[in-house]
Amino acid sequence: MKQATSESVVIARHINAFLNEYVPSQKSRSSHTLTSYQYALALYISFLETEKGISAERLCGGCFSRIIIEEWLQWLMEFRDNSPETCNNRLASLRTFLKYLGTRDILKLYLSDDATWIQRKKEVRKKVKGLSKKAVQALLSVPDLSLKSGRRDLALMIIIYSTAARIDEILSLRLEQLHLNAEKPNVTIIGKGTKIRTLYLLPKAVSHLKKYLKEFHGETPNPKAYVFYSRNTGLHGKMSQAAVNKQLKKHARAAYKLCDEVPLDLHAHQLRHAKASHWLEDGMNIVQISFLLGHEQLQTTMVYMDITLEQELKALATLEDENDKKVSKKWKNVRGGLAAFCGVKPVSYTHLRAHET
């Protein structure tokens, strides 16, 4: 049996360190993200072995070339029936690893640079199925409040809908992030890239959360405990997205009998999308909605909500107004001449002439 080369050993060690040390150490990474990285790399290694005939002793930097990665993406689509969106996610995971590899081995830095030139697959954007206000009301009316799980589910659905936060943001909430007794009750959300935003809560949401906390966390709650925790792992293990969506589908079946506008395949993201749509219906500006959703770019919100051309023009006009308000008064005041307008100290004509001579 041939022995692995020093290069193959180093790359294997970096893969192991990336998955077992680096990714888990990044607080902004969810367990779902770690699983995605693990699966993407497993698929890539499998492709190298089965399709390219790469054995352990032949593993090298060249195995991560742009050409081979592009072949892998094609293989994912043709032989594993992966959608363009899934292929793009797999590519993003591999790029993250290559970027990490480049920071650990400068001779491999070119691999990350080459990978950035790989074209993403064109995605056919799926519209999120809408959820009317009537459907939301029906959904919130069905949890059995005589059951502990029913009371938990109601509190969970209310906070997802009222904040329009991402499901992982909600499930990652710890008690110390809730400020229910503040003058303006709010929750601190840690979003993508550890970006923090404050979302204010209406009295109904506050009331339900307080009841939930008293029952599920007792009189002396642990600030570090997850708000919505797993029954299997306890206070320091958060509830899984799969468990949440399973409960949502159960409640959707019951709510459908009251309102046929409730989608039977309901998932948590639809509650977020529904709240954003309802904010828009109620006249909230798209710029404000974009901030509440935690989007970095206004365009993301427009695509996300399938904004009409008329709504887009109105939003952009408002954005221009907001930016104009931020301009310092001194830039808007043209009195005092060009020097004052530009913020420089004016020089007298006589001083200027003396300096020139």
Image (spheres, rainbow, N blue to C red):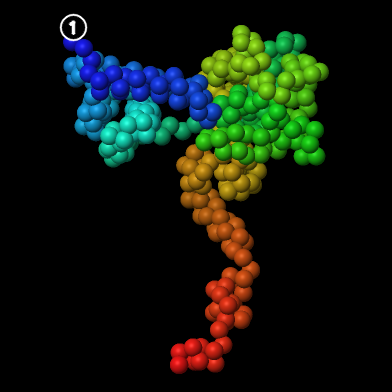
Residue for point 67% across, 38% down: 199
Label 1 is placed on what type of residue? Answer: Met
Identify which residue, 2 or 288, lies in the foreground: 2
- Seen at 56% across and 55% down, the residue is 319
Crowding at dot 1, Cα within 10 Å, few <14 / some 14-19 / many 20+, comes out as: few
Q: Is 62 placed left or right of 200 in the picture? A: left
Q: Position of residue 31 (x, y in %)?
A: 50, 21
| Residue 232, horizontal then vertical, whole percent | 61, 8
- Residue 101: quarter of image: top left
Q: Quadrant of residue 160?
A: top right
Q: Residue at x 51, y 47 (%)?
A: 298
User: What secondary structure is found at the residue carrying circle 1?
Assistant: loop
Residue 212, horizontal then vertical, whole percent? 75, 20
Q: Is residue 88 left or right of residue 249?
A: left
**Residue placed most toward the observer, 85 or 143:** 85
In the depicted structure, whether residue 256 falls above or below residue 300 = above
Q: Which residue is mark 1?
A: 1
State the image coordinates of residue 302 (x, y, percent, origin top left).
Answer: 50, 44
Give the residue at x 36% y 31%.
Answer: 104
- Mark yes or no: residue 254 visible: no
- In the image, taking residue 318 as reference, residue 7 lies left or right, namely left
Total numbered labels: 1
